[in-house]
Image (cartoon, rainbow, N blue to C red):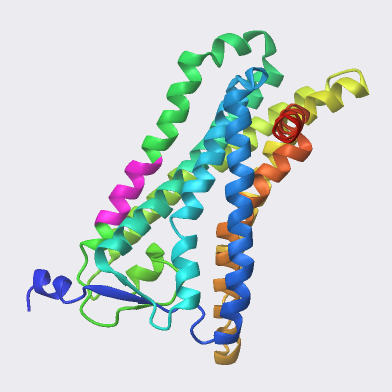
Amino acid sequence: MDVANQTASVTEFVLLGLSAHPKLEKTFFVLILLMYLVILLGNGVLILVTVSNSHLHMPMYFFLGNLSFLDICYTTSSVPLILDSFLTPRKTISFSACAVQMFLSFAMGATECVLLSMMAFDRYVAICNPLRYPVVTSKAAYMPMAAGSWVAGSTASMVQTSLAMRLPFCGDNIINHFTCEILAVLKLACADISVNVISMGVANVIFLGVPVLFISFSYVFIIATILRIPSAEGRKKAFSTCSAHLTVVVIFYGTILFMYGKPKSKDPLGADKQDLADKLISLFYGVVTPMLNPIIYSLRNKDVKAAVRNLVFQKCFA
């Protein structure tokens, strides 16, 4: 059988999800659905206020609007599929739908990594070089920066998805995950995946390692600049402009490091429990971070808080 026939033999995948724990499925259906509705509402409100409120027509809030839209896209690419799997006895997805879902999830994740580093650069210029801020972060600069984040994430995802889905899948078609997560799909390939492993490693360096270093160095300079401000009130005001972004960065990258950095259990019973824990952590990572982002910015940024309050007041008393 040639490669083309082998690949064609797999027309669908089975998403294992929580099939081994049916009692948990109904509970998590309600929980994830509520969280998804909060994500749509919270991020939708943030997009609305950043577009409609003239006081928020600044680079920082333009990036925030992009982040909110990205979070909606990221969760919508996977959560409806997950919710459907909780209610469907046979949890299948077609080969083409799996490729689309894989592309969207990877693209949104990679884009968020780049976008968070762009937001760190914005805060660095605003605090460390305030006099040059209007020039460095002009509309002619921040629009291409945001567009570049989307293009970079989509391009990387197209490469990784193409490399993964061109592999022959001639054996087991059961994906031990809620969605078509690229690493889970690669495990099913019946061919050498060394090229995929190398390309994923390169992508991880570019979209995880480089942004983390960039953000870290940015905040080293930001904190050093804030500490040189003579008044306590000035330091507090300066830190308040970047505390929301820093909190989001810590949650986003902290969860990733926790997911992929913890040791694997060698005990079979422990491995089963760890497999369930890994799935639940991955599940909540996909919804908790997008849900927390608008809450963090609404609570820790006084401009956003005021804009949201004004919007709610106008809608309630108009």
Whether residue 194 appears in this view of the structure is yes
Task: Tell me the quadrant of the picture where the N terminus can be found.
Answer: bottom left
From this viewpoint, which residue is outermost toward the front?
A: 318
Spot occupied by residue 231 in the image (x, y as percentages of width and height)? 92, 19
Spot occupied by residue 269 in the image (x, y as percentages of width and height)? 59, 91
Left or right: where 140 falls relative to 235 = left
- Give whichever of 51, 184 is nearer the camera: 51
- What is the count of numbered marks? 0
- Give whichever of 124, 77 is nearer the camera: 77
- Give whichever of 10, 42 is nearer the camera: 42
Residue displayed at 30% across by 60% down: 99
Left or right: where 149 falls relative to 305 = left
Spot occupied by residue 288 in the image (x, y as percentages of width and height)? 63, 57
Main SS of the magenta part reads helix
What span is colored magenta in the figure? 153-162
Q: Quadrant of residue 8?
A: bottom left
Q: Decide: is 85 above or below 196.
A: below
Residue displayed at 32% across by 42% down: 155
Residue 149 magenta? no
Q: Decide: is 148 above or below 169.
A: above
Whether residue 64 appears in this view of the structure is no
Task: Tell me the quadrant of the picture where the C terminus can be found.
Answer: top right
Spot occupied by residue 64 in the image (x, y as percentages of width and height)? 59, 33
Q: Decide: is 291 above or below 60.
A: below
From this viewpoint, which residue is outermost toward the left?
A: 1
Residue displayed at 37% across by 36% down: 151
Q: Quadrant of residue 184?
A: bottom left
